[in-house]
Amino acid sequence: MLQMSAIDSYYGRSHVLQGVALEAPAGRITAVLGRNGTGKTTLMKTIMGLTDRMSGSIRLDGTEIGHEPTFRRARAGIGYVPQGREIIPDFTIHENILMGAFARTDGRIEVPALVPELFPYLPENYDRRGGVLSGGQQQQLAIARALAANPKLLLLDEPSEGIQPSIVEEIHAVIARLNREHGLTVILVEQNIDFVRAVAHGFVMLEKGRIAACGPIETLTDDLVHRHMAV
Ligand SMILES: Nc1ncnc2c1ncn2[C@@H]1O[C@H](COP(=O)(O)OP(=O)(O)OP(=O)(O)O)[C@@H](O)[C@H]1O
């Protein structure tokens, strides 16, 4: 589905990703791991075209998209749930979800059928403003907004960050369902190794902007986790 090779990515003069390669096969969950500040969010932003500059190749189903503007990447089928969620606080739940639908190519500005099924809270509270929701509700909303674009590849940047544990489990269950029942390909930045081992098929481990290790999830050893993730 997505193949990145020889990726260098920059913010101004800051050279963050250095020679990164990643393969996210269709129908699979690929986890992006590593310590804070090592470039995980930059990797997601690079896929969306949101860093200042990059070189290298990003192919989506064989088509080079690495030099396309962000909106074309969204239209090509990449949904993005950013770190911190970036909900528009003054927009209602309904309006926030519909924002995602503008990336659809068929012009259907509507809430996808999947949303009430996965997140019943959202349609029951369409008129509430995004800014008054809890962290967990905002995360649900951010995922619903990404789904409204009908993506084939979903990028999730630390979806459990800053959310109370009981809600984290719900979010994790939704991610597993989106992949297993709905066939969505996922790239997931996640610190919870137990969850990663339970749902992911493959991983890349970043260290200071480079790939320190990658492979099938069975090869994510405790040693690798301790070496590259322990503080
Ligand atoms: N907008 C920016 N301008 C300049 N440097 C940035 C910018 N955003 C991030 N960086 C730098 O790039 C490096 C990688 O940051 P990034 O946010 O990708 O890491 P991360 O692995 O996602 O960390 P975290 O888990 O804390 O989110 C860090 O050194 C950070 O300071």
Image (cartoon, rainbow, N blue to C red):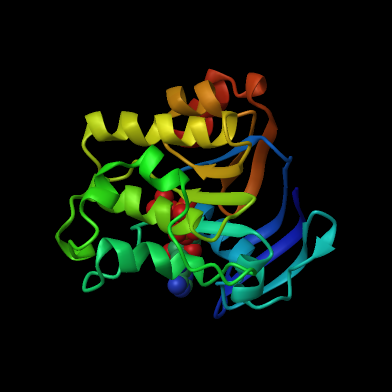
Q: Residue at left 66%, top 73%?
A: 72
Image quadrant where residue 88 sits = bottom left
The C terminus - image quarter: top left
Horizontal side, residue 41 vs residue 158: left or right: right
Tell how many labels: 0
Query: Against 199, is 119 above or below?
Result: below
**44 or 147: nearer the viewer:** 147
Q: Residue furthest left?
A: 132
**156 or 230: nearer the viewer:** 156
What is the x, y in percent for residue 27? 68, 36
Horizontal side, residue 36 vs residue 202: left or right: left
Image quadrant where residue 170 sits = top left
Horizontal side, residue 112 vs residue 219: left or right: left
**210 or 98: nearer the viewer:** 98
Res 82 seen here: no
What is the x, y in percent for residue 75? 64, 68
Q: Residue at left 25%, top 44%?
A: 121
Horizontal side, residue 101 vs residue 124: left or right: right
Query: Against 41, is 34 above or below?
Result: above
Res 7 seen here: yes
Query: Against 71, is 36 above or below?
Result: above
What is the x, y in percent for residue 106? 63, 68
Q: Residue at left 51%, top 58%?
A: 80
Q: Residue furthest right?
A: 62
Quadrant of the picture in which ligand 1 is shown: bottom left
Query: Against 187, is 76 above or below?
Result: below
Q: Residue at left 58%, top 36%?
A: 182
